Amino acid sequence: MELLFLVLLSVHIAKTATEGDKEWCYLSQKWTQSECAEPGVWDTVNEECGKKKQSPINIVTNKVKYKEDLKPFTFEGYNTNQSSPWRIENNGHTVKVSLSGSAKIGGGGLRNKYNAIEFHFHWGTSKGFSPGSEHSIDGERYAMELHIVHRKEGFSSTEQAVTDKEGLAVLGFFIKTGAKNENYEPLIEMLNEVAVKGSQKSMTSLPLQSLIPAKENLTHYYRYNGSLTTPNCNQAVVWTIFQEPIILKESQVKNFLETLYFTKDKTLLMTDNFRPVQPLSDRIVYRSDVSVIQPPAKALLVVPTLIYVMSLLFQ
């Protein structure tokens, strides 16, 4: 019996080691990296990816619930350049900018303060200009999505933070096309410097607030508990998805879609680097404002209803 136990234990350890070493990828990489694990089988890379509180999700606006304590955020150090340069890198999955942690967020219904440690992007493809945001609203997705990742104060590493179910707080911002955003130009100009997998450069830091909507437009948001959207998919994230999008010119968005590569040899453009939405299961999505902002199409439907109600009142 003891021998059998040892054999089974060794098999389990070997299986775990194999899973941990398996390379994960997006579906857009499968045709050149056939052995990698695409999103549908990320649980073979880490079993956490197969659990029930995963991200991203589709937010169904008529099912969200108002939560009174979801007040405006406090942003510390968001309006200044950090003292040390940023490190921008192509990690083979996205373009990521590492931060010093000097900028912080609080309020917003969070139980603690959180330090900003990095931000990165997700996008689609320029072929047909398909959307690439990870979260969606009533099934609709945006061109891109920005994630600013924060670690709870008191933790010195992400590895420590993910042991706490609220160890990380991620601010998610949709990006849609429109007018040119000059604030993004210094960042976009650096993309050519990190075009291939594994490349990284230092760049002059920017105020984080210059990359996101104005503070007065950040009071409307959705909140839920979920996970990182890449392996190891740790379920340790307090998610905030803002309703107000960031605006970039179409050509600025295409700089992400047409400049960066999944590979070191420029054989595969980095496109469609998003995880499909995951089941909500028994989770509740909350909203910060009493009345959900109506999408334009839905708002138009309200007009005839109001006219009808008013006509009844004055009969």
Image (cartoon, rainbow, N blue to C red):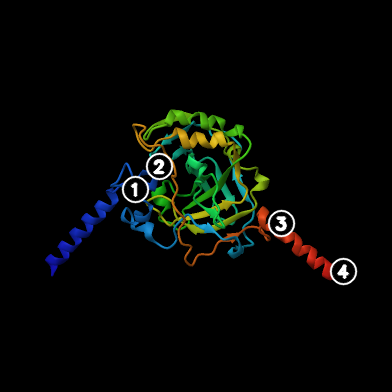
> Where the C terminus falls, by quadrant?
bottom right
Lateral position of residue 288 relative to residue 282, left or right: right
| Placement of 44 over or under 36, stated as above or below | below
Q: Which residue is mark 1?
A: 24
- Disc 4 secondary structure class: loop
- Disc 3 secondary structure class: helix
| Placement of 270 over or under 36, stated as above or below | above
- Disc 2 secondary structure class: loop
Q: Which residue is mark 3?
A: 300
- Disc 1 secondary structure class: loop
Q: CA distance from mark 3 to mark 4?
A: 22 Å
Q: Earlier in the sequence, mark 3 or mark 2?
A: 2
Q: Earlier in the sequence, mark 3 or mark 4?
A: 3
| Residue drawn 29% across the image and 51% down it | 20
Residue 300's x, y, as percent? 71, 56
Amino acid identity at mark 2:
His
Q: Quadrant of residue 49?
A: bottom left
Neighbourhood count class around disc 3 (C-alpha, 10 Å): few under 14, some 14–19, many 20 upward: few
